[in-house]
Image: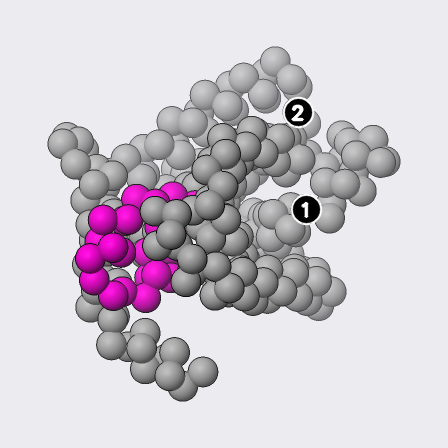
Amino acid sequence: MTRYIENFKKFQPLLYELVARDVKIKYRKSVLGVLWTLLNPLMMMIILSIVFSNLMKFDVQNYSLYLLCGQILFNFYNEATSGAMTSILGNAPLIKKVYIPKYLFVVSRIASSSINILSSFCALILVMLFTRQELHFTMFLVVIPLVYLIIFSMGVGLILAALTVKFRDIMHLYTVFLTGLMYLTPVIYPMSMLPGWVYKIVSINPLTMIMVIFRNVVIYNTIPSVGEFIVPLIIVIVTFFLGLWVFYKQQDKFILNL
């Protein structure tokens, strides 16, 4: 483990460069640049709030904030894991030329997406101030679900990156999977509207668990129970180490399939 930590420290400057490159590429030739990390969730929230609060008649207190919280978390997961999935393939020319710890490419994609979620959280604060919602002291606990989400996305991203090098069809299948996952995560709808068996399926979704914690501490001024913290933590840790194991087992074969 010490060897891996020392290796990571050695390549830290490169990681910073990779993250900066990912951010620059995303907003290259964009007039507003990184401001889109604030504008995107705000505009989507306005559109979806109008559609679902009026047409679907969702009776949810502070629905705009409810929707924005779910949207921020799911969009991060979508962006982070999708980017991590193609990170090895996208850097194939560099991997073929010089030795670089391959996990750095996955980490850089997760890190650049983490910058975006922090900007989106700023957008959430602005909405709360604009709508005169109370900023609760429990918001200081928001770091817990965000760390859960980042580590969980890292584990999933490592698995996807390792498998996609050999099985390119995963890129297409994962797009379909994300569509289904969005409907199995309470991003736009309240859990209370779900029938019993669907409720059970949605409630065991790790993203749902993280989303519930996030909304409780941000909107509802509620500190989740110990169990609500521990269960997703166990899932997050298991997913992360599973991702490390899969990536470690496959990384030496990457060069054969790039």
5 and 152: which is toward the camera: 5
Label 1 element class: loop
Q: Determine which residue is flagged by label 2.
A: 58
| Badge 2: residue crowd in 10 Å (few <14, some 14–19, many ≥20) | some
Question: Quick check: 187 above or below 219?
Answer: above
User: In the picture provided, is 36 more to the left or to the right than 241?
Assistant: left
Q: Is residue 153 left or right of residue 57?
A: left
Write down the residue under mark 1. 205
Q: Earlier in the sequence, mark 2 or mark 1?
A: 2
Q: Is residue 249 magenta?
A: no
Where, quadrant-wise, is the N terminus in this rendering? bottom left
Q: Is residue 185 left or right of residue 157?
A: right
Question: What residue sits 44% from the left and 50% below the top?
Answer: 161
Q: Quadrant of residue 182?
A: top right
Dot 2 falls on a residue whose secondary structure is loop
> x, y (%) of residue 138?
55, 60
The amino acid pointed to by label 2 is Phe
Foreground pick, 162 / 118:
162
Q: Is residue 218 visible?
A: yes
Q: Is residue 69 above or below residue 135?
A: above
Residue found at x 73% / y 48%: 204
Please name whichever residue, 5 or 184, is drawn nearer the observer in this view of the structure. Answer: 5
Residue type at tag 1: Asn
- Would you say the magenta stretch is mainly helix, strand or loop? helix
On the image, the x and y values in percent for residue 89 come to: 34, 45
Q: Is residue 148 at least partly visible in the picture?
A: no
Instruction: Please provide percent x and percent y for residue 91.
Output: 27, 49
**x 76%, y 41%: residue:** 201
Which numbered dot is residue 112?
none
In terms of depth relative to the viewer, which is nearer, 153 or 144?
153
Q: Which residues are magenta?
A: 83-107
Way the structure is coloured: one colour
